[in-house]
Amino acid sequence: MKKFAFVTLLALALAICSCGHTIPTAITNTEANGNWEAELTPSAGMNGLSFVTTFSVIDTAPLDITAFGFINSGPCFATGLDQEPVSGSASFGTNTGTGQVTGTLTYIVHSSVPPGNLLTLNGQLSGTSNGTTTTTGTLSNGVVWGTWTLTNGPETPQCTGTGNFIMCQGTATCSIP
């Protein structure tokens, strides 16, 4: 009986000591930054939209957008640099062994002239990182692809649609991995 009690107490002690203990994992942080160009496929009744933007973000956070401008916007948005309020966020991780970056990105454009139009891009992000477990890497060959949705404001009933997009880091063309 004493042996049984001792074994039971030992098992209980080991179970309690192991609670909350995790094996540390290696983490590689990556910063996505620089110039990006997005091309949206046309939707019924809408010409394709395209824009350029500059932003930075590390792993999971809101985008720090420092520049934005439509290349072609049609009647739904003002054309030109920094004419529209923009925001976004990203959530991605880096495989420490391979440097492969995967995750998601959301980018939102609100129209100021004409008011009320809203363009939302939701996509998958991919690329490579030169980071290590002790240094923050830089994303290269970045690609974001997914779907876009445009909802109209009160003055522009024609500004609605959905479609696909691709956003390329540092280049006008890239391909979905």
Image: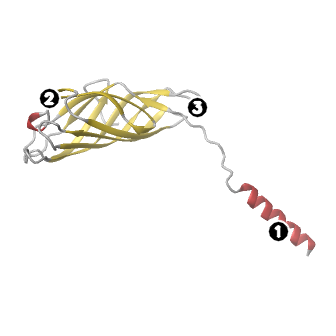
Q: Secondary structure at mark 2?
A: loop
Q: How many marks?
A: 3
Up-down relation of residue 83 to residue 120 (above or below)? above
Q: Which residue is mark 1?
A: 8
Question: In the picture, residue 173 is in which quadrant?
Answer: top left
Q: Secondary structure at mark 1?
A: helix
Query: Callout 3: few (<14), some (14-19), or many (20+) C-alpha neighbours within 10 Å?
Result: few
Cα separation between marks 3 and 2: 42 Å
Q: Which residue is mark 3?
A: 133
User: Seen in the image, is 78 located left or right of residue 38?
Assistant: left
Q: Nearer the viewer, residue 119 or 23?
A: 119
Q: Which residue is mark 2?
A: 79
Question: In the picture, residue 111 is in which quadrant?
Answer: top left
**Amino acid at pointer 2:** Thr
Q: Position of residue 88 (x, y in %)?
A: 33, 39
Q: Position of residue 16 (x, y in %)?
A: 74, 60
Query: Callout 1: few (<14), some (14-19), or many (20+) C-alpha neighbours within 10 Å?
Result: few
The residue located at (78%, 59%) in the rendering is 14
Q: Nearer the viewer, residue 87 or 20?
A: 87
